[in-house]
Amino acid sequence: MAKQHKFLLDESQMPTRWYNIVPDLPSPPPPPLHPGTHQPVGPDDLAPLFPEDLILQEVSTERYIEIPEEVQDIYRLWRPSPLYRAHNLERALGTPAHIYYKYEGVSPAGSHKPNTSVPQAYYNAKSGVSKLTTETGAGQWGTALAFACALFGLECEVWQVGASYDSKPSRRTVIETFGGSVHRSPSELTEIGRKILGDLPDHPGSLGIAISEAVEVAGQDEKIHYALGSVLNHVLLHQTVIGEEAILQLEMAGEQPDVIVGCTGGGSNFAGLAFPFLREKLAGRMSPTIRAVEPASCPSLTRGTYAYDFGDTGGFTPLMKMHTLGHDFVPDPIHAGGLRYHGMSPLISHVYELGLMEAIAVPQTECFAAALQFARSEGIVPAPEPTHALAACIREALAAKEAGDERVILTALCGHGHFDMAAYDAYLGGRMVDEELTDQRFAEPLTRLPQIG
């Protein structure tokens, strides 16, 4: 019998609801706090940055939220996305494990990010906003938001982390092609940017700094809102279309996952895949191990502290209870720019604290070794971010080989690496190195966490 490599759903099977995990958890996550009063934030506190629909989704305790028809129509450009069985990779590894990957690189932006950029642009346009500001690391989120803004007639202004801005000029070009404007962060356009550049003119930037700049500009005009590509509850909510589809596709394959692996920076890709399966696990219908994989140079889950902290460097955002390395932590400029964030999603942090998932950190050279093995067997060049998950999948598959069992491994390949050739060139040329990590590297920024009574 011929091996089946691809599992496809038709449009009628595309999810029509987003899944909210909050009502299914044993306890609710801690609320975000106002940075001045340290009291839980209310809708009025968030209104200068987000439209009412997204604020309601952020605090929702409803299990399912209907996807607007206008958003579904756009989703159909690339959804449902394919699930692949990695037979060639399995053979290359000599493993009896079954490896599946949900491929989100088929979207117009080449990643999972349009799953949330489209509804965010839709709700903002519906509220009368004319412009969105945002940050981006590697550039996938900036690309996705520029694409979505073009569909709904909104301006899009992006602050890109300096290290990625310098190394990935093609990403900037794609953002501009979709109609967005891009600035290197930190920039001279904002007060926080000028302050940081005054201290260090060639600052490599961080996602925390870029968020501060985008939020600062959005707060100056009621017709401008801010859009975030990860971390917040409503962003994770929108991404659950990934896992909902994967459940149906694994049923087509006649399998259930034993291990679910996802790369994590802010957490939206990981949550999008894992949360629908966690729902099934909590209900007793399956029992997978769920494992987050983060970069060794920015390990918020495995080496951070679970505490209230700002989501940005400048301290403009509410305080969020999350695993954090400190809001002014500046990660090493590794090639997986989308994972270089100082904190983890509060919702994922809470799930981790409840003991419902695991986390590991992997160095980037191991990740790119896995990327080459994957590309040479499966024919897709992965973005640097999901190479972390691929490295963990290979570890798991080799463990299955050692144990002689046919465990089922599922991951999300959240984007392609067509604009990341500089990273591959660095690895192939022997110029990529792993940061030498010490406890002191992570300890010092944590001394400046906000003091919450």
Image (cartoon, rainbow, N blue to C red):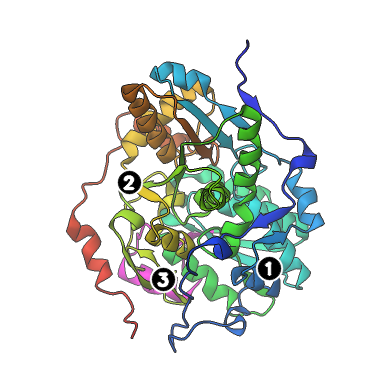
Q: Please report the residue visible at 56 percent of the width from the left and 48 percent of the height from the top.
A: 280
* Mark nearer the N terminus (3 vs 2): 3
* Mark nearer the N terminus (1 vs 3): 1
CA separation in Å, label 3 and label 2: 21 Å
Question: What is the quadrant of residue 405 in the picture?
Answer: top left
Residue 344 in picture, x, y percent from top left: 42, 60
Residue 289 in picture, x, y percent from top left: 43, 43
* Mark nearer the N terminus (1 vs 2): 1
Asked if the stretch drawn in magenta spans residue 10, the answer is: no
Residue 415 in picture, x, y percent from top left: 55, 40
Judge from the rendering whether residue 304 lies leftward or rightward of residue 37; answer left or right.
left
Q: Nearer the viewer, mark 1 or mark 2?
A: 2
- Along the line of sight, which residue is nearer the eye, 268 or 407? 407
Tag count in the figure? 3
Q: Is residue 138 above or below residue 214?
A: above
Asked if labels 2 and 1 touch by Cβ distance under 8 angstroms, the answer is no
For the residue carrying disc 3, how many other residues have a C-alpha within 10 Å: few (<14), some (14-19), or many (20+)? many
- The residue tagged 3 is 321
- The residue tagged 1 is 131
Q: Amino acid at mark 2?
A: Ala
Kindly identify which numbered label has been placed on residue 361.
2
Q: Is residue 10 above or below residue 187?
A: above
Q: Please report the residue visible at 63 percent of the width from the left and 10 percent of the height from the top.
A: 1
Magenta region, residue range: 183-205
Asked whether residue 298 appears in the rendered view, the answer is yes
CA separation in Å, label 1 and label 3: 29 Å
Q: Amino acid at mark 1?
A: Lys
For the residue carrying disc 1, how many other residues have a C-alpha within 10 Å: few (<14), some (14-19), or many (20+)? many
Q: Is residue 422 above or below residue 173?
A: above
